[in-house]
Amino acid sequence: MINSIAQISIPLFLKSLEDLLRRPTYDFFGDQDLLWAEAQNQSLEYVKNIIPDYKEYVERNGSAMVFLPILKSQIFNTSRVAVKSMITSSGTSGRPTQIPLDELSLKFRIKIMKKTYEAMGFSDVFDQAFCFLVEPTTTSENSSTSSVSSMAASVVTHKTLQTYKNCRAIHFMSRATAKGMELNIEPFGSLEKLDSLKPILILGYPSLIFHFIQILRNRGLSSLPLPKDSAIMTGGGWKSFIGKVNMDQSKFRKMASQFFVIPEVQIRDMFGLSESPIIFVQCEKFNFHVPSFCRASAIDPINLKADLMKNSQEGLLKIEAPFTTSFPLNSILTTDKVSFHIGCSCGRKSSYFIPLGRARVATFETCAMKIGQAFSTELQPGLKR
Amino acid sequence: MIHQQILFELRKKRGVWLTQSESQHLQNIASVKELWSVNSPWREKAFQLPHKPFTKKAVELSLDALEKSLTLENLKKAITQEIGPDYLSWFQIESERNFFKDVPWGIVTQILPGNNFMTGVISVLQCLLTRNSVILKPSRSDLGFLKLFIESIRASRGNSLVEHIYLVDSQEADIPTIEFLKKNSDALMVWGGNEAVAAFPQHECAGPVIYHGPRIGLGLIEAEQVTDEELAGFAWDICLWEQLACSSPRIILIKDKAPFHLSLKIAQRLELELQKMNAILPATNLTLDEKSEVLLIREKIKWNPDQKLMTPSNVVTHTVGWGSKFPSEIPIGYRSVLLAPFENFEEIQESLVKLRPFLQSVTIASRLPQQDELVEKLIQFGVHQFLKSGNGLPGNFSFPHEGEFPLRRLRRLVGFHQEKSPFTNSYPSEST
């Protein structure tokens, strides 16, 4: 890791990041949150220094924000980044984005996931974890984008669960093959022989969990009661459900609650992006609260202002978080449509958002719509090394 | 769902139609004109239809153009100009004994695009004018103009024309219907982007497929001569069709001896003209999806060190970008345009080669005559239309589209052989 960068005291920067994570996760520290602002500024300076193309962009345009679709076409010189792990998005909305993470960025992603889980009531109590995610080792071999990259959700979840002292085993229920993602039912045996006293965690893509339940039902199992305090945490892929089954979150919760015989409140969804270190976990009222160590807002894509927040109007989700030091992800504007609200009955003070789907970035019904893509031959997305 | 009986009915009615005199036929079509005059109830109905993203002014001007094209004189002119005076009659080429005749294809299926509310109306008229029965499959985003226009034909004195039209209902526009149309139409005309065109490969269709695939428009400015009026014309062309037509100038090339200096100023001037144009053709309120698309265009410009965003961030009505060279990507979004200078044609040649399969029109703001060397070069690179800036409204049928007069694509030529036979060594007329 680089120990000093012009205008940044690395120890102070790291301390500010740690301090942010020490605060109560869902308290509101006001619009003038100096600790957060200082950490964000330091982080921005750090990334600008390590990625010269980004620095040049920020200085030319006076804006540090990155609109995520830009990452698919923009080439960054990351030769100064000590890459610890290369992660990718799932690629559900096109070509997957590759994100290089240095040791610090990876470490903070793990800390943030752990802290968020705990703040939502899921601490280190699980005996085993069954991850309906692609096994990280198989994505490395089969990724179409890079031989050394893995899906972000798999990598970070795996490493986070590894820090749980009480968790005896982490099973991955899916693997990447040359033909695509397939369900791996080998760990099924462990699930049948559960210790009835120790809770387990089921986590991952709801479509895979649903598929798994169907397999068990086809084998004649009408329910599989889980030990008390077990939890299910879903994430991503509500639109790309297997077999195009019409399944929304509340239906899934009901169905999973009946099958695994756990209360619905123990089934929560997560909202995250490979480009963001922040993971949003639903509260007991199934709302996504904004943690105090980041900023999130609904942005009008034309004037880039957060005016839409006032009346809970729909805007694009912007996430500002100072925890990535290896790629320009401190201030990202996503294509996720959200509306923001306050006053959740769960009692948490921070605002929460409701996801409203993804913006279609090619909306114009024009006969020339695809020409832009056909013509674009100069930019080859990826990382310049 | 459409079935053989409907096609049978359409075919049955063709016989009488084809024997009807040309003058009676044209009068029938022209009788629709009076229904579309200014302040007519049909116009009022048209204004009440949703027309987003187009302005009311664009609808009004399109209806003016429609009314104008429906005069008997203009209908006659279109068919004579494009196909000749002998449509449906046998003719001979001088000094030859063989006979030829232009005839309609028969039943033509039109797969219509969603980018322009008038395309369906124009397609019906072109088919009727050439006496092709027409099956219309509107786009999912059709705004309702087509249905309204067909109703107006039914209400006109030429109401028998509706016997030759079948409008596919949105609910029946499913895969079996499309497959039926592929296999049973005498010809298909497919409008749209790559996906639409790819869905109708020739080998899957019984009749010939006439493609109106993805096309694009450019602009051309001579830096030292361009006037504010001509730039206002560009602003008009950009706003009128909201950059959704194949005549829309999405990249404007500036021929300039000192590229950076003058071309940047021209981009600034166009930016101001677009701001002014908003008073005449007010911008629509964009949806979040549409705004996101505009944002992506703006961000791509901002990230490109060779480009500059000329539109202030508080201006939401349009987007103007300037680049020091021909851009590698074409901005496709609401009222978005990129300007780029060039000194010599050779500089842009390579980019034009890549665009060649898609090039349709070039909008010009210059004193260039049609004989100019630059015009000739652009023709060599595949351009089909040249329009002076401010002329982006099609006023009549007879303007080339994809390299051909539109009515010509709706007729086929048949021949009657009359040469001397080597077998009998006599002309057919002599052998009896």
Image (tube, coloured by chain):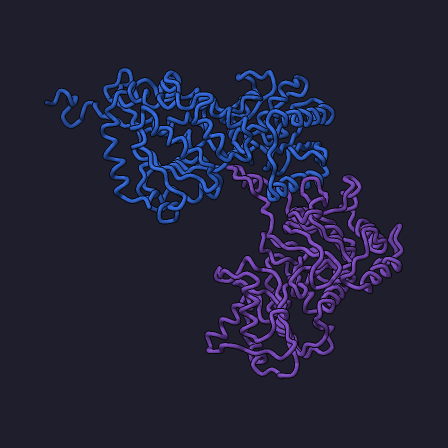
In this rendering, would A326 be left or right of B21?
right
x then y, percent, for residue B21: 26, 20
Q: Residue furthest left?
A: B432
x then y, percent, for residue A312: 67, 49
A121, above or below B273, in the image: below
Quadrant of the frame with the N terminus of chain A: bottom right
In depth, the one of A214 and B41 nearer the eye is: B41
A86, above or below B321, in the image: below
x then y, percent, for residue A222: 49, 77
x then y, percent, for residue A235: 62, 63
Asked if residue A174 shows in the view, the reply is yes
The residue at 42%/36% (across/down) is B211
Asked if residue B343 shows in the view, the reply is no
In this rendering, would A3 be left or right of A80?
right
Q: Which chain is purple?
A: A
In this rendering, would A11 be left or right of B378?
right
Q: Quadrant of residue B416?
A: top left
Q: Which chain is blue?
A: B
In depth, the one of A330 and B220 nearer the eye is: A330
A195, above or below B50, in the image: below
